[in-house]
Image: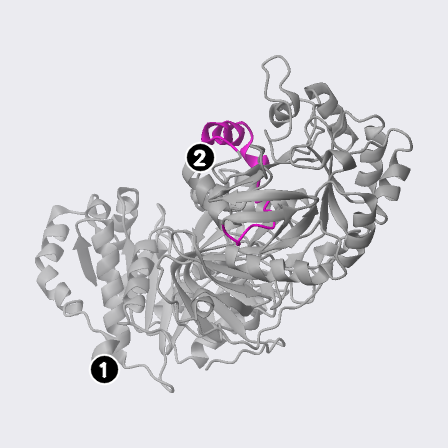
Amino acid sequence: MRLVILDNYDLASEWAAKYICNRIIQFKPGQDRYFTLGLPTGSTPLGCYKKLIEYHKNGDLSFKYVKTFNMDEYVGLPRNHPESYHSYMWNNFFKHIDIDPNNAHILDGNAADLQAECDAFEKKIKEAGGIDLFVGEGIGPDGHIAFNEPGSSLVSRTRLKTLAMDTILANAKYFDGDLSKVPTMALTVGVGTVMDAREVMILITGAHKAFALYKAIEEGVNHMWTVSAFQQHPRTIFVCDEDATLELRVKTVKYFKGLMHVHNKLVDPLYSMKEGD
Amino acid sequence: MRRGQGAARASVLQFTNCRLLRGGTLLREDLWVREGRVLDPEKLFFDERRLADKQKDCGGCILAPGFIDVQINGGFGVDFSQATEDVGSGVALVARKILSHGVTAFCPTLVTSPPEVYHKVLPQIPVKRGGPHGAGVIGVHLEGPFISRQKRGAHPEAYVRSFEANAFHDVLATYGSLDNVCILTLAPELGRSHEVIQELTARGIRVSLGHSVADLRTAEDAMQSGATFITHLFNAMLPFHHRDPGIVGLLTSDQVPPGRHIFYGMIADGIHTNPAALRIAHRAHPQGLVLVTDAIPALGLGNGRHTLGQQVVEVDGLSAYVAGTKTLCGSIAPMDVCVRHFLQTTGCSVESALESASLHPAQLLGLEKHKGTLDFGADADSPVQPPTLVWLPAWSTSLGLSVPTSWRWGWGCDMAPRPHCCLPPDFVVLDDALHVQATYISGELVWQAEMARQ
């Protein structure tokens, strides 16, 4: 695991965006060689998306040969509802970049057969050759990955989940604070689905995530803190801000901060498609 | 380029790097258009899996709905109230010329005239769609002759009349036919005005109060009967009085029928209304303010003598008087000048200024579902038409416009009963000083500043 600690949210978002940018460019995507990216939603990755859009608008990064798979989507929420993850991805990312709409995959929470939809999603990932980099976020105060709430199997696949009360409460702010309006079910990739990715990057910012981060990396692998599963993934990066490390041991933080010069080599130099990489 | 699997193969155009006037605010959004409809790009992306075929960088400009002028008496030497054999040509000339002012739809206005003029002229001004030929004609605005003699302003006294004798029959006898009419200005203090107002309203004609000495009570009664507009507020009516605000009091009247509010025309040319008065009206009731030009035939002609109705007028700069008097007889300020002046004088937001020239007149005429807004058009199989547009770039140089000329906007209308509802969405390009640079009607470039200078 790499634990990349930046001073604040903006710097953490930027580091993450640079990493994604470099990974895509170094992969040299093309007509027959698409870079597959797993994508999150929520407030945490917004800064990262903004930076990626910036790189795109500067001409440094193109998503023409990138395929994306989002982690989750609410069930029963109309697709054009402002809080649906389709709307989120469109407004915060897709509409600003040059991705081919056929390559942007998001689970359909209004599908007639939800399980079939989940199975089809898994199939699409497989057909795309698996995911090169799965970006996750949030983890919530309960350390979940996507909507794999506490108690989810660590080998789970894409499926329908009922949301935990914590999650519903946390989401209420997006629904005018009205709990009755918050969806109670969602389709989500499983822990196992994300574990299958060749690389995983989790963004964790804010003091309210600190305890979950501690549980995720300093305690054991536990299905009550599903993000802890990535301790067993060969290539995981946790990108955090200072506040998210508040519950970690000083020793842990010092160790990883000491490695920042190594971590920074992953984002510096920042590559650009302009240079014909 | 990318090809989606959607059934609609028509070209999708995306106006990028612009600010849309949507929902009363300027949003940093792109405008997506296909075959005459404003598209919801999110649906296009997820349903049709398509991107735009062509993009147009707007350089950070503003896109807003097209200007609608509901009171214009003529212009460029044309007098709508003059009974000639070929009124249509005059209307067409004005329609073409006002494109350069950002006006994409208008109501040719006839001042107080004898019946024979109406009988001859009205049938020659049919409702007409806008196009390469010019701005759309929504319908005629009849300003008079059922007005107050005392407040006739520049209207000829000889032809002022009342409908006390036979109410609506007098109205029909005077005008001949009301088929092409969409607004009618009258003085509500005239006897039997309630019957007339009710009958006109039932026929879908907007009744406007003006050239009147009505007190507030009379004006409120007229509103209850169906009147929804005030013709050039402050002008040709009793001045505001704190114990009887008169027609002006309608702006804050508590007798407005629920779900409605009064609209009022303002000539914001810097001459007809003192800036302080303009601000008072705007602050009292910003949602009802409708910018009008009340332009006379001298619009666009320059200083000198010109005709208006049955009278001669003198133009000096931005002022136009009845020849030999100090009575104002209409404005010669183009609509975009009015919008600029209004913005500057009231200090209102750009959104508010733009809506006063587009959304509000559209609402007055009941067209707001189709014009005056930039909301998404309905699905491709729906007959609802998208709105008009005014495009305001942030720079004033040549825009390098390279819009395909093969666009055609679709038609569809579900509004009854007035036929003027079927108007296409139009674009107007303005620089940051709000000077019109280019105009599009039905997606075609129909006027451009550079072309005009050649």
Viewer-proximal residue among A246 and A215: A246
Chain on which label 1 sits: A
Residue B21: percent from left, percent from top: 49, 51
Q: How crowded is mark 2: few (under 14 residues within 10 Å), some or many (20 or more)?
A: some
SS type, badge 2: helix
Q: Is residue B181 inside the magenta stretch? A: no
Q: Residues within 10 Å of mark 1 (few under 14, many from 20)?
A: few
Label 2 sits on what residue type? Answer: Thr
* Segment tinted magenta in the rendering: B273-302
Is the same chain shared between marks 2 and 1?
no
Q: Is residue B284 inside the magenta stretch? A: yes
**Residue pushed farthest bottom?**
A32
For residue A276, the mark is: 1
Location of residue B227 (image quadrant): top right
Left of B81 or right of it: where is B268? Answer: left
Residue B173: percent from left, percent from top: 88, 43
Left of A76 or right of it: where is A277? Answer: left
**Residue pushed farthest top?**
B243
Viewer-proximal residue among A63 and B376: B376
> Disc 2 to disc 1, how far (Cα)?
53 Å
SS type, badge 1: loop
> Mark 2 highlights which residue?
B346
Does B73 sit above or below residue B438? above
Chain on which label 2 sits: B
Q: Is residue B72 visible?
A: no
User: Which of the two marks, 2 or 1, is nearer to us in this view?
Assistant: 2
Q: Can residue B56 be seen in this view?
A: yes
Viewer-proximal residue among B169 and A14: B169
Does B404 sit above or below residue A146? below
